[in-house]
Amino acid sequence: MNSLVRCRILPWRCPPLQLRSFSSTLPQQLIKPISELPHCIKPSYIQRPQNTLLSLQWPSPPRNILITKKKRTPGITDSLVEYAQHLHSTYPAINIILSPESSEEVHSRVPFPVYTYAEPTSNHSPEYLGDKTDLVCTLGGDGTILRASSLFAHSALVPPILSFAMGTIGFLGEWKFKEYKRAFREVYMSGASDAYAHLEFPDEHLASEDIVPSAPPTSPSDPLDKPLTYAAIRGKAMGSSRNARILLRNRLKVGVFGPDGARINGASDDGDTYALNEVIVHRGSSPHLKIIDVYVGNRFLTEAVADGMIISSPTGSTAYSLSSGGSIVHPLVPSLLLTPICPRSLSFRPLVLPANTPITLRLGEKNRGREVEVSIDGKRISEGIGVGMEVRVLGERVRNSAKEWCGGVPSIVRGTVGTEEREEDHWVGGLNALLKFNYPFGDQDSDGRH
């Protein structure tokens, strides 16, 4: 044994070691700022004859994908990781954008960098998000869709939203998560028959990434997991009936002004906030009813004495407005809903008005309680609110003078059933399956049988 040891090196005489790390685990990846991404690709929405839905057409394949998820739900977090890995391995040129919270949560679990944005200040949208996002994907319920829409609350243009129903009700969600591969493929290829016919590589960097994916497919046996390169889709046609269908949801354009006339909900005179669901004026913690002067079309309508007032969009007609006795309105009907909350007068009934009708709610001088709460799609405004405060609401303009679609929230819905003329109205199905419209009492069916 001594012959094998030529010399003994004392510990304190050892030279400093150059340590090298050898690990079989994936290294922790980076979180990059969204400002490094290329500018967004704006799609077109084509009106087809005899169809109420629009067709989505990309001028080139989308690259920057924002994914939002339901918070504090471990199962959905795992689904987010699975979804992001599939997108990166199958569509190598795609960049994944996550919220700051989600990026911190999952960036070490994926073998590629993710992008994020800075949390916005009050009454502002995240910087660069509207200029960089091509497509939004939501994993969660209706609240997740509303939160994704609120990220663009100060932007006239909202990217298309592909929603996966993973929440409690999912009335606004269109797809089940198990269908995510087919759903995203159809959205990614929408318009490929025309727009992608003469597609070239965006640049050499992306071309090389497209040819050699940096991550293996999640399921090599699944044809939808095969890496899809720019070269592979050049000139491919999905067929006119395979274009992704768009339901354009009208929003509310909301301005909140203090008693002194200064704007509260924006940084400038034209800083209106867009709401997908509703704007609410409510008594909050005050024990007193509120006296609210209501103006419709710049004319005085009534002095409302109630817990509050709701002005909702057609999309928001199935939310708080419905619980307060308001009508159910189809999202394709351009309208505004004026609904009182627990009014003192039993003859005060909800109203449905044209979308281009301006509505003003003013907190009257007769109020004993001097405070009120204003909420825009669930976000409260409490500072600067008092007697004389005004909320001014107008339906969003979704089409300009050139007949181009320039507003609203483009929601991607399921495609056609059979031919292009036979479109499936999932809103009607949602009323029956989720809201139990005209559902019989107990376990008795419509024929009187048990």
Image (cartoon, rainbow, N blue to C red):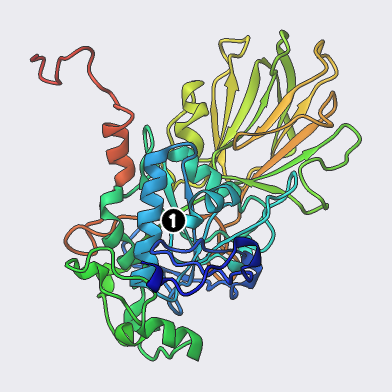
Looking at the image, residue 403 sits to the left or right of residue 255; the answer is left
Q: Is residue 369 above or below residue 6?
A: above
Question: In the rendered view of the protein, which quadrant contains the N terminus?
Answer: bottom left
Q: How many numbered marks have been drawn onto this rendered protein structure?
A: 1
Q: What residue is shown at x 81% (from left), y 21% (from top)?
A: 364
Callout 1 amino acid = Arg
Q: Position of residue 375 (x, y in %)?
A: 66, 32
Q: Position of residue 330 (x, y in %)?
A: 41, 41
Looking at the image, residue 446 sits to the left or right of residue 208; the answer is left
Q: Is residue 370 above or below residue 190?
A: above
Q: Nearer the viewer, residue 84 or 326?
A: 84
Q: Nearer the viewer, residue 255 or 73?
A: 73
Q: What residue is shown at x 25% (from left), y 22% (from top)?
A: 439
- Check the image and name the residue furthest to the left: 449
Residue 446 figure quarter: top left
Evaluate whether residue 120 shows in this view: yes
Q: What residue is shown at x 49% (from left), y 56% (from top)?
A: 108
Q: Position of residue 116 (x, y in %)?
A: 59, 59
Residue located beneath label 1 in the image = 109
Q: Position of residue 322 (x, y in %)?
A: 47, 26
Q: What residue is shown at x 49% (from left), y 91% (from top)?
A: 204
